[in-house]
Amino acid sequence: MRSFASQSHVVWDCKYHVVIVPKYRKKKLYGDTRQRIGQIIRKLAEERHIVVLEGHAMPDHIHLVLSIPPRESVADVMGFLKGKSAIRAHFEFSKRKAPTQQKHFWSRGYFVSTVGIDEEMIRKYVRNQDDNDKRENNNPPLDLYWN
């Protein structure tokens, strides 16, 4: 069963599978660092009303399943999560506490994929809307077939 969230003007279910990688794919995510990075990401996500549905860290990357409200773009959310978590990780894990030291923790890019309804189910739904429309008010069908 799908769970939909709602706001005053929208009902939504926007879920994304995201993979982020430490700089140069170094194996930095183990032990206490692994646990603390997870806590930092969850805390930052709460600040932007993002729900971390799943999360799993490997030594050289993190998989996240995020529920992001439609008012937020994925790029903005990832910039926020990666940027703020890198700064916090720097101050917690770096040996030197110099504020001028560069705070690179994550690589520049990320992987994102939508998690949603099956494509074939959507195509079938769109195809059958024509039949439903005919039955409801006897209108002629629209010519929207591109294939």
Image (cartoon, rainbow, N blue to C red):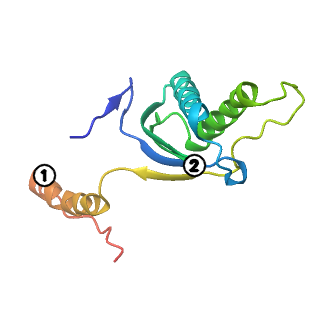
Left or right: residue 3 versus residue 111 is left
Residue drawn at x 71%, y 48% as measured from the top left: 23
Compared to 8, does 121 lie above or below?
Answer: below
Given the image, on which type of amino acid does mark 2 rest?
His
Residue drawn at x 38%, y 32% as measured from the top left: 10
Which callout, 1 or 2, points to the residue nearer the camera?
Answer: 2
Left or right: residue 53 versus residue 137 is right
The residue wearing badge 1 is 137
In the picture, the quarter occupied by the C terminus is: bottom left
The residue wearing badge 2 is 61
Left or right: residue 133 versus residue 16 is left
Compared to 7, does 14 lie above or below?
Answer: below
Residue drawn at x 12%, y 52% as measured from the top left: 137
Percent position of residue 94, x then y: 77, 31
Mark before the other along the chain sequence, 1 or 2: 2
Percent position of residue 45, x then y: 53, 28
- Dot 1 crowding, Cα within 10 Å, few <14, some 14–19, many 20+: few
Q: How many marks?
A: 2
Left or right: residue 87 versus residue 52 is right
Given the image, on which type of amino acid does mark 1 rest?
Asn
Quarter of the image holding residue 28? top right
- Dot 2 crowding, Cα within 10 Å, few <14, some 14–19, many 20+: some
Q: Considering the numbered disc 2 on the image, is that residue within a helix, a strand or a loop?
A: strand
